[in-house]
Amino acid sequence: MSLILTIMHDRHTNRERYFNEQVFTTTNYVIPYLKGLMDITPETTVAEIGCGEGGNLLPFLDLGCKIIGIDLAANKIENAKKFFDNHPNKQLATFIAEDIYKVNPADYPQFDLIIMRDTIEHIPNQEIFLENLKQFLSPKGKVFFAFPPWRMPFGGHQQICRSRYLSKLPYFHLLPNFLYVGILKMFGENQQTIDSLLEIKDTGISISRFEKIVKNCNYKIEKKTYYMINPNYEIKFKLKTRILPGIMNIPHFRDFFTTAMYCVISKD
């Protein structure tokens, strides 16, 4: 366990490693997950919101798809441009440093697929966001989500803590704010880290809340899977992917043991 958590901490500072992990998981899990729901061809337009350096988009560019990556962090977008600079299909790739709430849908084509991996749990006003997302989708477009439910062991993203102890401590992000902040300060976390963790605490999303928002926004869930062992853990930790056992698939209870939810939705 100690080795696993050390890797989790390290990958947040090694962007090329993180990029390659995204490429692996999208190639081996995300694209196969979409099969049967949509055809991915050179005519497919793919966008990722919260794309980081764009590792999730590379497998689609390899297939000849037109891709657009959007991320609030300008430094990550600059890294993405460097990572894609020598790709033979780079003319099909666009990267934008912008807040998604400020992006005008009229400036871009409607997308056949929108990817959101490890992103929805960082976005404020999620119901408003999902409602606005419809403007970016083609009539038969799909949205793929992968995210850690808030109550999972590291749903608070505490692996970013500088304290080696706190970065390995599960579930303590579920404490009331005054206790949570007190512990973070006690272990010497700086204000920037504390603010980031509180922001995640504010936007973290449970499975039930996610599904309720999807329903309220009149989307159709086409496929969903709860993973006890996140598919991404294969490349990160050499662990075999495992779906949450049916006996544990109990609302609220499942959130504590689901390390990732995969879901595909479309406009109903």
Image (tube, rainbow, N blue to C red):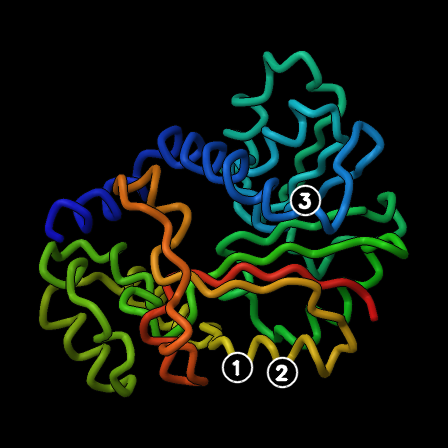
| Residue 127 locus on image (x, y percent) | 67, 77
Identify the image quadrant of residue 59. Answer: top right
| Residue 198 locus on image (x, y percent) | 36, 72
Give left or right: position of 74 versus 136.
left
Badge 1: residue crowd in 10 Å (few <14, some 14–19, many ≥20): some
Amino acid, disc 1: Ser
Mark 1 vs mark 3: which is more N-terminal?
Answer: 3
72 or 47, which lies in front?
A: 47
Amino acid, disc 3: Lys
Identify the image quadrant of residue 135. Answer: bottom right
Give left or right: position of 259 versus 37.
left
Mark 3 vs mark 2: which is more N-terminal?
Answer: 3
- Dot 2: element: helix
Give left or right: position of 49 versus 172.
right
Does residue 257 lie above or below 111 as drawn? below
| Residue 78 locus on image (x, y percent) | 54, 30
Which dot, 1 or 3, sits closer to the camera?
A: 3
Q: Which residue is mark 1?
A: 208
Amino acid, disc 2: Lys
- Dot 3: element: loop
Q: Which residue is mark 3?
A: 35
Does residue 126 lie above or below 234 as drawn? below
- Give the CA distance from mark 3 to mark 2: 25 Å
| Disc sitting over residue 250 in the figure | none
Confirm or deny contact between disc 2 and disc 1 (CB under 8 A): yes
- Give the CA distance from mark 1 to mark 3: 25 Å
- Dot 1: element: helix
260 or 88, which lies in front?
A: 260
Give left or right: position of 220 versus 258.
right
Identified at 50% across, 36% down, the residue is 28
Q: Which residue is mark 2?
A: 212
